[in-house]
Amino acid sequence: MTPPDEDALQSGIARLLAMQGKNTGASAMLQALAIDARLLAPASELITRAELAMALNALLFADLLERVPTAARQVAEVRAQGDRIVFDHGALRTIDGPTGALPRGHSAFARLLEPLGYHVGGHYPLPRLGMTGRAYVHKDLPEGIPQFFVSELHVDQLPEEGQNAATRVFRESCDPVDLEDEDRLKHLAADGVLPTEEAAALLSTLVAAFDRRHPVPRLDDYEALLACSKEAAWIATEGNAFNHATTRVPDVEALAERLKEQGYPMKEAVEISANGRVRQTAILADRVHRTFRLREGGTVEREVPGSFYEFITRDVDPETGTLDLSFDSGNATGIFAVTRSA
């Protein structure tokens, strides 16, 4: 799947990553990820939407490794064996409620992902969590470019105290997308390509969108959210950062047992989709320290669940002869519990 490293480092994706001021990290990601050869053509004056999508995924994957030491350790072990990571999808959580200047819920990311060539491949109700998930699949290389699983938490389904806390936490969210970025997205959607300089500028904004876009939450608001929705509380501290990144592996059950033997804090059981073709498990979320504002003034630090690293096995769909790229509401609900169990 992946051509020699030197070819990868001469590609448009490599140029994009280097222009983000992360040249060393760019080289590391190009060597760590199994990237489809069709995405690694020699750099030209134009960047395709598929190249831009893969560059974004590479940077977000690198960001998750920086924030989740357990994931970085596991990836380093895979690389030490001479293997590469097949990046299946990244997941993020959004707020379907008052979000200030930021579009609410999944729409904040639909406007970014669709010009990159993504479309919604499936809707996944998550009623036990008061959420809805959407899988964004790339039109050009659905198996070769990671998907985005974008979930939104429905604030109006929280109890009144939780709704009030959510409003206070998220109502001052800011939007990283300015008028120039909107113009770039419009041209990308129409033409499928952007000049390299324009693509690099847009990529910087895209990365910034996957972060906490609201002010530091107040501790009492966080605790009110935690009491009614651990997922809402997680978004309060982590924002729209990748909740997890997922690598595609041949046998997730065997891998889970091996990682347990190696001392990784694994999810208790593997989640299996209703059709049996999609199986998932994860390492429990790493703990992180976050700052909170106090009602009476000042700040305090608390340890909370951060992001985590997931593994997935996808079988071929006999009806299409291609990988089953679907998700499963039951699987997603089970996997989301990883941030509760950390």
Image: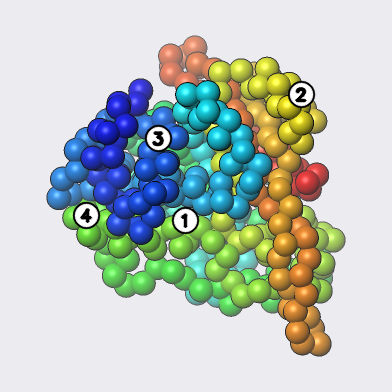
Amino acid on which the number 3 mark rests in the picture: Gln
Count residues near mark 3 (Cα–Cα under 10 Å), then give few for <14, some for 14-19, many for 20+. Answer: many
Asked if the residue under mark 1 is in contact with the one under mark 2, i.e. CB atoms within 8 Å, the reply is: no
Q: In this view, which residue lies farthest toward the bottom?
A: 296
Tell me which label, 1 or 4, sits earlier in the chain: 1
Q: Is residue 41 left or right of residue 172?
A: left
- Discs 4/3, front: 3
Give the colour scheme shown. Answer: rainbow
Helix, strand or loop at label 3? It is helix
Percent x, y for residue 37?
Answer: 29, 28
Q: List the residue tagged with mark 3.
A: 31
Q: List the residue tagged with mark 1.
A: 109
Label disc, if present, on residue 196 of the rendered structure: 4
**Which residue is painted at 71% across and 57% down in the image?**
288
Q: Is residue 341 left or right of residue 23?
A: right
- Discs 2/1, front: 2
Query: How many angstroms separate mark 1 from mark 3 (CA)?
Result: 28 Å
Query: How many angstroms separate mark 1 from mark 4 (CA)?
Result: 22 Å
Helix, strand or loop at label 1? It is helix
Q: Is residue 107 visible?
A: no
